[in-house]
Every structure is written in C-alpha cells, then in structure tokens.
Image (spheres, rainbow, N blue to C red):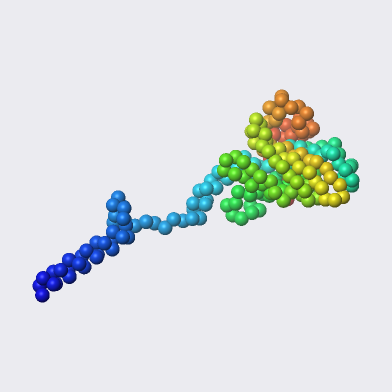
Amino acid sequence: MKKFAALLLTLILALTVFSACAKNTDPATAGTTTANVDNGAAADNGLAYMDDIRATYGNGCYGWFYTANGTGEYVDVSERGHDVRCFFDFDAGPEGSPVALASVRNYDNETEIARFTVQFGSDGSWSIGGATILEVQAATMTHQEVSEYPHLLAITGTVDDGKGTFDYTISLRPWGESWDDVAAAMPENMPEHYDDWYLPLINDGAAMPWQN
C-alpha cells in the first residue's frame, strides 16, 4: 500500500509539472503571464503619422483650379482658371481615420468649386475619392504627387455626366509655404494672384481666410 501511495503521489506531481509546462512552453518566460494586447492602441500607433499630416495640411492650402476641353453644356468652362483655398476636415470621418474631407473654394469668396475625400498613407501616398467638381459628380479622377515640389498635391480628372465633359486640374500646397520652386521651373503653373493676394497675407503671418 505504501508503494502504491508513493507511486500515486509521483504521478500527481508529474501531471502538475506537465500542466504548468503546457501553459508556458518558453523557458525564458516561465512563471510569467502575457498581457492582453490592446488592438485599439495598436491601431492608434499605426496612425501616428497622421499627426504630421495634420500639422502639414491642417491649416489649409492655397493653389489653383483650372478647367479645359469643355464640350456640350460645359463648353463655357473651357480654359478657365481660379486661385483657390482648400480646407481639410480631419474630423469628418471616423475617429483616428486617415481620411479627410476637402473643400475647395475661390480664393476671395466662399463659393465651393470642388469637394472630395483624401486618404493619406503612412508612406507619403494619398488617394482621392468621391469628387464633386463645380457641383457635378466627377466621372474619373486621377491623382499624383509632384515629388520634386514638397507637399504639392496635383489632382487631375474628367467630368462626364452625359450632358457634356470637361477636364480639370487642382494644385494645392499647404498655406504659408512658398511657391518659389514652382515659379522658377514652371512659371505657367503659378496661381494668378500669388504675388498680390497670397504673399502679402503669409508675409504678415495671417491664417488662411475661411468661413464655415
């Protein structure tokens, strides 16, 4: 009987050790517990780059809007250009989202010329969606970042709603930044009122005029 009791005790101890090892097979972490991972915190860390995006574009943008090649009912919008302002609403989407809603308006009044969403990537990329141009839903929209000009967003596309078509280009740069590099390389791509409207404001340190 004593031999049986000793054998039973040995078996119980062996099972206890096996159970402990099954719960933690890594000897480096034996005796420790693993904390639950907060997926929300991980997602926030993954979007930390948005702090830089907000800092760059959060005060608005200045640039120009141009239309060309109008046909049908839009023949009158051909070869027309406007200086514009753009405001990015980073709070329009879900909290922590990399998406902003952009509203593009004339430089000297609150007439909205374009509205679209922008999704910013952590690698510096960005994509456009849901564009409305001159109150018409854009049929196609392409986009590219002109890499040789920092922070310059260049957006091109075509509106085609069955009543006519026109091409458009929107070039935007964060409010307060100089366009001297563009002026030196491509003076034809400068906003018309850069010298007489934009420069005096930014030289005075003025915020971008905007009315909600």
Residue placed farthest to the bottom in the image?
1
Q: Nearer the viewer, residue 99 or 129?
A: 129
Q: Nearer the viewer, residue 192 or 205?
A: 192
Which of the 4 quarters of the picture holds residue 191? top right
Q: Quadrant of the N terminus?
A: bottom left
Residue 57, horizontal then vertical, whole percent: 64, 41
Which of the 4 quarters of the picture holds residue 14? bottom left
Residue 94, horizontal then vertical, whole percent: 61, 55
Regarding residue 47, the answer to whether it shows in the image is yes
Left or right: 139, with 152 as reference point: right
Residue placed farthest to the left in the image?
2
- Residue drawn 24% across the image and 65% down it: 15
Left or right: 194, with 100 as reference point: right
Residue placed farthest to the top in the image?
184
- Residue drawn 42% across the image and 58% down it: 36
Q: Nearer the viewer, residue 94 or 161?
A: 161
- Residue drawn 84% across the image and 45% down it: 165
Residue 149, horizontal then vertical, whole percent: 66, 31
- Residue drawn 57% across the image and 40% down it: 123
Q: How many marks?
A: 0
Which of the 4 quarters of the picture holds residue 80? top right
211 relative to 183, above or below:
below
Residue 161, horizontal then vertical, whole percent: 83, 50
Left or right: 82, with 41 as reference point: right
Regarding residue 52, the answer to whether it shows in the image is no
